[in-house]
Image: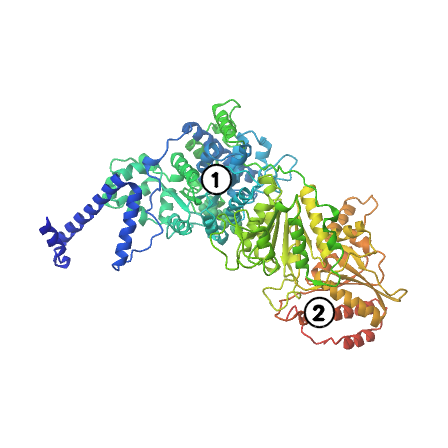
Amino acid sequence: MTDVLDELLNLDRSQLEPDELRRLNETELREWLESLDYVLASGGADRVKDILQMLEHHAYKHGVPIPYNVTTPYINTIPVDEQPEYPGDLEIEERITNLIRWNAMAMVVRANKVSSGIGGHIATYASAATLYEVGFNHFFHGPKAGADADLVYFQGHASPGFYARSFLEGRFPVEAMRNFRRELQDEPGLSSYPHPWLMPDYWSFPTVSMGIGPLASIYQARFRRYLEDRGLLPGGNGRVWAFVGDGETDEVETLGAIRIAARNQLDNLIWVVNCNLQRLDGPVYGNGKIIQELEGIFRGAGWNVIKVAWGSKWDELLARDHDGTLARRFEEMVDGESQRYAAFGAPELRDRFFNTPELKKLIEDWTDADIAQLNRGGHDPVKIYAAFQRAVQHEGSPTAILFRTVKGYGMGDAGEAQNVTHQQKKLDVDQMRAFRDRFELPVSDEEITKYPFFRPEEDSPELRYLLERREELGGFLPARSPKSEPLDPPPADAFEEFMQGTDGREVSTTMAFVSILRKLLRDEAWGKLVVPIVPDEARTFGMEALFRQIGIYSSVGQLYEPVDRENLLYYKESRDGQILEEGITEAGSMASFLAAGTAYANYGVNAVPFFIYYSMFGFQRIGDMIWAAGDSRARGFLVGGTAGRTTLAGEGLQHQDGHSHVLAYPVPNLLAYDPSFAYEIAILVREGLRRMYQQQDDVFYYLTVGNENYAQPAAPAHLSREALEEGVIKGLYLFRPAGRKRSKLHAQLLGSGSIMNEALEAARILEEDYKVATDVWSVTSYKALHVEALEVERHNRLHPDEEPREPFVARQLRDAKGVLVAASDYMKILPDALARHLPKGIVALGTDGFGRSEAREELRDFFEVDARHIVLATLQALAQEGSLEPSVVAKARGELGIDPDKPNPFVY
Ligand SMILES: Cc1ncc(C[n+]2csc(CCOP(=O)(O)OP(=O)(O)O)c2C)c(N)n1
Ligand SMILES: [Mg+2]
């Protein structure tokens, strides 16, 4: 034996004949494999893992780098012998699935027959039907499951499938099914996609803007942990399931935060990625394998990955495949090729896939009918069940299940695996018949032309089964059922200190806001409900004191001694920490806002998110998510810090925000405010709490705060508290009446945010130097004024026979004398949009244009919003109405030191 070994060791392989070398290689490999089999049998899988790891290290030490491989072979993760027995009645479940398939298809085809172009998708749900059905029958826990209730992010454009199921469940009348995508009919209709705004008892999460659902699901799962860890929600087995399209993974939002899920060990999160290998135009990754690519990405990020690529019929072939030929062929096949087999069926598969003598041998006794059963794993309920079961049992990390399916499954030549399938919404009679026959549906030839919906008798085995399963699992899904109790706002005097001003002490509105927040955090009822969310900007906003006061949430606590431990305000992470310090991700932070802002509906917890961020990186960066917050009926406060194009000095073009208030207009249920003073913020925060949590209005708030320090005034004495509050909330009030009485010249200046101080200074100059009696108004919200004015205008238009109403803004300014001049740190469009609701014309000053790195004073000159420019604009307006000679204005321009030839900031 030793001699043989010596001989082998001294062998010079290069001297061997090819045949000898092959035999040697084979023997060597067999011995290694046999050793491994022995270790597996006697020491188990863990021992095998240990040894392989040690071997790898050993090889590495001897200079043999083992290529790092994040993927596993392209076969199912769960071996056949580890598949649990299916607990349901497969036959009846298949019949139910087929009925849902039919109704989902019929609702789209019918909707487009009645109203061509109304749209809808068949192919997506067709590919995912069995995935969802296994979930509905065995996994998804409904609202009645309490702490075990699941939250499910349904793939948006698969909506016909969910409606079709709900129809079987008796949740929708047939009229609703007929009115899919018709929400404005006299009969009930169904919204195209998941929109809580439109179907508030049904949908919880808007998912159809690709990428937002997956991202939101991560932060949802984390937020659930946060509520549990902070004692606001009882711990349970409730999970977050997110259904994701393989094409959807192209969106940076989809995969951009997956490591956050791994970091937080979110084993309450399961992603079901429906890899039908196609997106809208064609293959997701025709030249590669999307499942393998995604596996690498998820595994690399620390997720548990389960691949379900091949259906049970393939197991027979894999069992015959002793030398790995079939597995290698899987590996070799790119998705574009695979799509052909799904599209063209058995003959194509026989000829092209089984393309070597070894492969052909595997199917030599198979008919085309046998081959046709070689299904993809995502259509096989037994495989799906095994994967879901493994996912819910997995601990310590999130799970992604990658299911291989066929897009347009069952649509036959109407679209199965065709590149056009995503858009297919019309099936002719023959195609409908083929669909019916394939899924063995009880629809007659005569009926078929009417695209009937089919619902079995109430006491049919199918309906009984379906309803029993849902009852057992805690009720129907999708379902949205807000269940939080109304909560009174803090008492009126809670924020009294902010009504008094700072007595000359200069503080920014950001600092004032943070003080209000700290005050709220100490409130008995509200304190624990506040969820401060910051994307790595807490120090920018002077919030670092909160680190120590309320802690930063971390699912694992703090595993290190922070470098600033000696410091009073050290960086404290803890499991019951309150701040969500998200790192540099506005999108992730907004996802947290979505989760916290809808906690009242999903968990019955009145969480109050305050998402504080650089205002520039809000609407224009994550506007679609803010839109989704509106749709979701999220509550809470978005706080745009370092706001104002000229208030944020030095930072320049990409930081200085002079338009977020314009971008805030489109979101209908968002109230946007640009407050100038601490007491305005205090009034708005209290009002927001009252409206959102006591009155339970589905609105949310946007406040901009600046970093310019100035003395915060006390609430003006000339107004009653009610009048002041009304003005602040509705958007306009008289802050300082003119000092000069009985003047010939009058002006009304409207200031906002920190430009208010410029308006006040302008008023002083106008009164002292130009004898213009000048009132100064604070405009807290152009949007609020505008929205109310439009509502009044509309009312008057629709009720011409009634006494016309007057918009609030017009009423406020009705008796105001002289010219109107508005100045803000935002675009001129804000006051301009109000113009036709005002008793007279208005001159708008604002900050249209790209920002500059400069100091505040220069910036305000450049953008023409400083006191001097306000004075000039006022005098010019007075000249235009004929109260002043133009020469006076020209002279004033010189006195004010304004260069008439200065460049236009908008075009320059
Ligand atoms: C942000 C965004 N961009 C584009 C679309 C339009 N769109 C709807 S579905 C779809 C293709 C989806 O493909 P995939 O994610 O693979 O889902 P499948 O239908 O294949 O399951 C596209 C591009 C959208 N809904 N959202
Ligand atoms: Mg797809």
Residue at horizontal 12 percent and vertical 59 percent from the top: 15
In the picture as drawn, the residue positioned furthest to the front comes out as 566
Decide which of tag 2 and tag 1 comes sooner along the chain: 1
C-alpha separation, residue under disc 2 versus residue under disc 1: 56 Å
Q: Residue 809, how many percent across, how many down?
A: 78, 54
Residue 625 vertical placement versus 816 (above, below): above
Q: Residue 777, how many percent across, how many down?
A: 78, 59
Give, as a three-letter code, the residue at label 1: Tyr
**Location of the C terminus (image quadrant):** bottom right
Which of discs 2 and 1 lies nearer the camera? The answer is 2
Residue 864 is tagged as 2
Task: Classify residue 309 by image quadrant.
Answer: top left
Q: Residues within 10 Å of mark 1 (few under 14, many from 20)?
A: many
Along the line of sight, the residue nearer the viewer: 168 or 657: 657
Disc 2 CB within 8 Å of nearest ligand 1 atom: no
Residue 563 vertical placement versus 185 (above, below): below
Q: In this rendering, would 151 be left or right of 650?
A: left
Q: In this rendering, would 521 be left or right of 898?
A: left
Coloration of the structure image: rainbow
Along the line of sight, the residue nearer the viewer: 524 or 181: 524
**Secondary structure found at label 2:** loop
Give, as a three-letter code, the residue at label 2: Glu
Residue 491 is tagged as none
Q: Residue 400, how many percent across, how many down?
A: 43, 45
**Secondary structure found at label 1:** helix
Q: Which residue is mark 1?
A: 125
Q: In this rendering, would 755 be left or right of 208?
A: right
Residue at horizontal 57 percent and vertical 43 percent from the top: 118
Along the line of sight, the residue nearer the viewer: 441 or 531: 531
Along the line of sight, the residue nearer the viewer: 881 or 476: 476
In the picture as drawn, the residue positioned furthest to the right comes out as 742
Q: Is residue 275 visible?
A: no
